[in-house]
Image: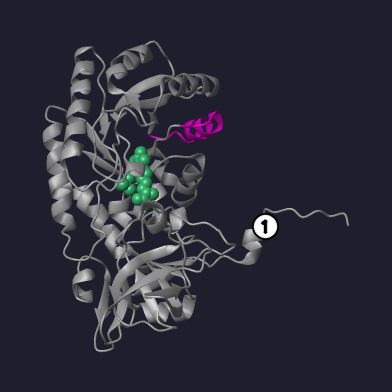
Amino acid sequence: MTIASITSSRPFRLVQPQGVLHCGSVSLEALARTFGTPLYVYSADQILDRLQLFQQAFTDRETLICYAVKANSALAILQFLARHGAGFDIVSGGELERVLTAAPEAASRVVFSGVGKTAAEIDQALGADILEFNVESETELELLADRARKLKRKARVALRVNPDVFAETHPYISTGLREHKFGIDIRRAFRLYKSMLGSRWLEPHGVSVHIGSQIRSADPFGAALERVNKLVRQLDRAGISLGSIDAGGGLGIDYHGGSFDAAAKVREYAQALQSALAGFEGRLLLEPGRFLVAQAGALVARVLYVKRNGSKTFVIADAAMNDLIRPALYQAHHEIVPVRPRSGKARAVDVVGPVCESGDFFARDRGLPPLRPGDLIALLDAGAYGMAQSSNYNTRPRPAEVLIHGRKTRLIRRRETMNDIFAPEILATET
Ligand code: LLP
């Protein structure tokens, strides 16, 4: 596959005559010179395009796109999305703090999901008067009622139901089956909604569902939403009318090169949801994460060494599994493109990092153009669950991050220093 076909649906492109990979109109070579490597580079333009695909896909229905903060929680990205009308799906008090810091005006557009909300997190969210709690168990509902009464704040509730729908994806990120820890069995939800009627502090507001992540087909979304819609009709007949349905996130992208028509994907997804929601006139909430930010981002790394062991060639980069864990954790595929491709025959190599584990790899037996020490490479589709899942393993400072908007480059997170890493640690003072 040619580099041009790999990058065709991404904001990263080889720009001639030098043949250097750019993000929009900004050279990745120049960025690496200015900010060092490893470096996360994101295209604000693509993030906005993707957000607008969702915002415009549902004609005749009020929708709110609640970006899943966990996918990439950079404050600057949250601020950017909020300015363009996004709401947020959060799963911790920490993520709520991020939204309140980046875009305090967006508090009223926050939904709070997650199976293990603490009393302190619930209080924090009640205080911020968020849009909706996506409640995942009966005991959480009891705790929420208790905290709301104490704080004298009404909680808007959506039960996150588990629709028992199979979504074909990696087992670690599939969530919609009864055997998973997520949500409330949809068969018990009716009774729980009825139980809320007696409460002064709980307002039945909506229903939510999320069946998993990196789901490529629209069918399971439609199947889940049909079940949810059935529940909503049933509640309606019982006099409980819910104003919103939250369909969760999970729409997948193509991590492999080649053409990927994001607009067509969103259209197909919207159609599946719309027909499953027939008869429901309320508001639709969506929680996309990956689809908005994954392809907008690349992790740029420098080749440190090229070495041969037996029959294998290893390209050792200065980025590692602590910076981008997806290949190690889910055997995920990320396309790798040299920033200034050399001519010559492609050869199968393993691209690895410096961390002391054999699991520290980005690609195995991947055909790549010739690479030499000092060359730059870009790991594509790293905008979602890249930096967000990074760590300091092997005492490696986390990368810097830059956001490209048109011709403008903005450093949105500086590279970590040793001081940042040591700050919370405590040495003995006595000798
Ligand atoms: N809503 C809820 C309740 C979620 O749990 C998730 C993701 C989303 C929305 C967003 O899903 P998305 O649109 O991004 O697929 N670390 C894994 C993905 C974990 C997804 C967890 N939940 C990965 O790197 O593939």
| Residue plotted at (50% across, 50% down) | 101
Q: Which of the 4 image quarters holds residue 418? A: bottom right
State whether the magenta stretch is mostly helix, strand or loop. helix
Horizontal and vertical percent position of residue 53: 20, 53
Q: Which of the 4 image quarters holds residue 91? A: top left
Horizontal and vertical percent position of residue 63: 23, 40
| Residue plotted at (24% across, 59% down) | 49
Q: Amino acid at mark 1?
A: Ala
Horizontal and vertical percent position of residue 420: 62, 61
Q: Is residue 332 left or right of residue 151?
A: left
Residue 27 is one of the magenta-drawn residues: no
| Residue plotted at (21% across, 30% down) | 282
Q: Is residue 415 left or right of residue 169?
A: right
Q: Which residues are magenta?
A: 116-131
Residue 117 is one of the magenta-drawn residues: yes
Mark count: 1
Task: Residue lying at the far front in this picture: please name it.
Answer: 310
Residue highlighted by disc 1: 423
Quarter of the image that includes the N terminus = bottom left
Q: Nearer the viewer, residue 250 or 319?
A: 319
Horizontal and vertical percent position of residue 235: 23, 17
Instruction: From this view, report whether residue 77 is shown above or below residue 337.
Output: above
Secondary structure under the numbered disc 1 in the rendered image:
loop
For mark 1, does the 10 Å Cα neighbourhood hold few (<14), some (14 to 19), or many (20 or more) residues? few
Q: How is the image coloured?
A: one colour
Q: Look at the numbered disc 1 and say if its residue's Cβ is closer than 8 Å to ligand 1.
A: no
Q: Which of the 4 image quarters holds residue 328? A: bottom left
Quarter of the image that includes the C terminus = bottom right
